Amino acid sequence: MKNSASRIAFAFVLGVTATVVHSQVVTPPLNPVIGRSDTFSADPRVPKPNTPPCTVNLFSNLQFADFNTKNFTYAPPKGCPGPWSKVVLKADFTVTAGRQFDRTAEFFVGGANIYFGTTAEPRKTLSPNWHVERDLTDLSAIFTTSQAGTAILGNFVGNSGGVDYTGIIYSTAQLLFYPISSTVPAPKVPDIVIGIPGNSGAANLNSTSSQLTQSVTLPTNVEEAYLDVIAQSQSNDEFWYLCVPDDLATQLQSCGSTGFRETEISIDGVPAGVAPVYPWVFTGGIDPYLWEPIPGVQTLDFKPFRVNLTPFAALLSDGKAHTIAISVFNADSYFAVEGNLLAFTDKGSKQVTGQLIQNTLTAAPSPTIVNKIVTDTNGYVTGFVKVSDVRQYTLYSTLYTSHGPVHTRVYASLDFTNKQNFVINSTAYKQDLVQTTTGNISTITSDSGVTRTDEQVLSYPFTFNFDETVNSDGTLTIANKSDQKYLVKAKTFYPPNTWADTTLTSTGTPAPFVQTVSNEVSSTDDLFYDANGNFTGHAGQAWQTYVGKDSSGYCYSRSLVAQNLVFTSDTVGAACAPPNPQK
């Protein structure tokens, strides 16, 4: 928000000079401590095999007190050669008590991004520490040989504009390699992993026309290709979901370029895929009290979005250099963007051929803007502004491999809506956001007489209410309320053949495999100021519920509740309990 009262709230919450200093990472607790304010998320740790892993330490107690890139060297685990059943990153973080902003953290090995997230903010007597884990099994190819690694976590410590920033960040990171066994075999993983742009870190895209580009030359036998992409909003674009059309930005005291952003992927300038942008909110965002002790959805560990580039496999297999490009529609200084290109090769063929038969993806979206803002004779504002977009496209290809022709059809439908209601007058500034991103992405693959459908259904509902009111006695109240959801269902099944141009039938049909994730963080906070604009206190509460299930029987659920910055409840497994028998 761009109004003065929210800036006052932001400055207050940052804290004051540190009284507690740590010189190393403090091991985060396995569970939140009731009655304390330690940073904790209900997100699960990565499920792991019941076998001892081989451990490789990337760095230990690495200090981040400047903007220099930290280099390290990775070496494969001794006596534990691949393939591995699972590879997991474990990282612990600590921020010393005092004053500090949230910061962005990126870790790379061999040019591939292995972690991207932001940090928690400290207070005078609070030194946050937290733990993250990421499943890196799909990146196994880069871990078979020694690699250069980098940790990028810019953090200013010192005096700026008369303000002392004292919070020093420390981190320790390890890779865990789980050997295969008779009960836990090696999964199919990509043969090629290429980081874009590499160990140098994410590229900053300042406008729609800005692109992160990289030339790649792949083997001539690529049969599957994917791009895992992350687009993180920064600077003017940090609160992109609260932005409005340029011609309304000054009047509504907000940022411009509308409340719509979208990540675009192209190959040699040809549109190749779309990734929705998740509305992450960092721990210093809008009202930092909203995210303590429970951070927003994925704040500490962003989840990349996987774009299927398999319809372009024949092109990528021609032995020539090709340019992969990533851009963000409506970027407005700026989005930090990076990706990992993953490719599977046909072991039985030296040359894969084929063609892209259909591509209905347009280069750019065409969002619709509705302006219902009304200004009266006093200059007071009421009404709403809305931006929406619908994307539907099909990619269809045929690939000739050692195991016969493979037909791939990717169908994607993405719907986006951002509606903001405003009331602006002499005693109130209200901005209420309702935003929804929904999507259905289906890939139908016909290979060797078997047809498989991989379907992903996603929903990213997000509401935020900012209500600033000048009370009759001159005091000021700012009421903030946020609700974020990350809802994803992935399903793999083998339906009867649906290809109109073939006579193939489905054979050997396994049972469908379904995975679901439901992650919701809801929080409220009221900020209070006296008639002179001095901060006098706040009151708030927050809760998070995470439920993850799949067809193998895996189930994890956890619910956290906090009141006035301390945990009051931690419930594990409630959504996984078997139903009560009927009486």
Image (tube, rainbow, N blue to C red):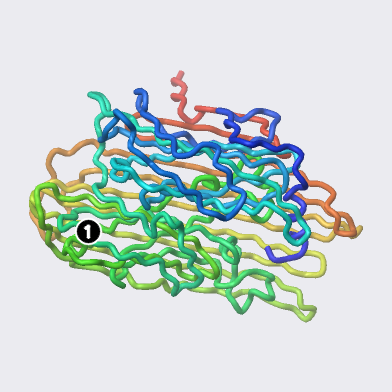
| Element marked by disc 1 | loop
Q: Position of residue 7 (x, y in %)?
A: 74, 60
Looking at this view, is 129 or 366 the one in front? 129
Image quarter for residue 120? top right
Depth check: 371 or 252 in front? 252
Residue 370, compared with residue 104, is above or below; it is: below
Q: Is residue 117 depicted above or below 321 in this figure?
A: above
Measured as percent of width and height from the top left, residue 318 is found at 16, 64
- Viewer-proximal residue among 246 and 383: 246
> Which residue ends up furthest to the right in the rendered image?
473
If the image is split into quadrants, where does the N terminus sit? bottom right
Mark 1: which amino acid?
Answer: Leu
Residue at label 1? 218
Residue at 37% x, 62% y: name it.
274
Q: Picture quarter containing residue 267?
A: bottom left
Residue, x 17% and y 63% (percent of image)?
319
- Name the residue at 24% across, 47% down: 191
Is residue 31 among what the camera can see? Answer: yes
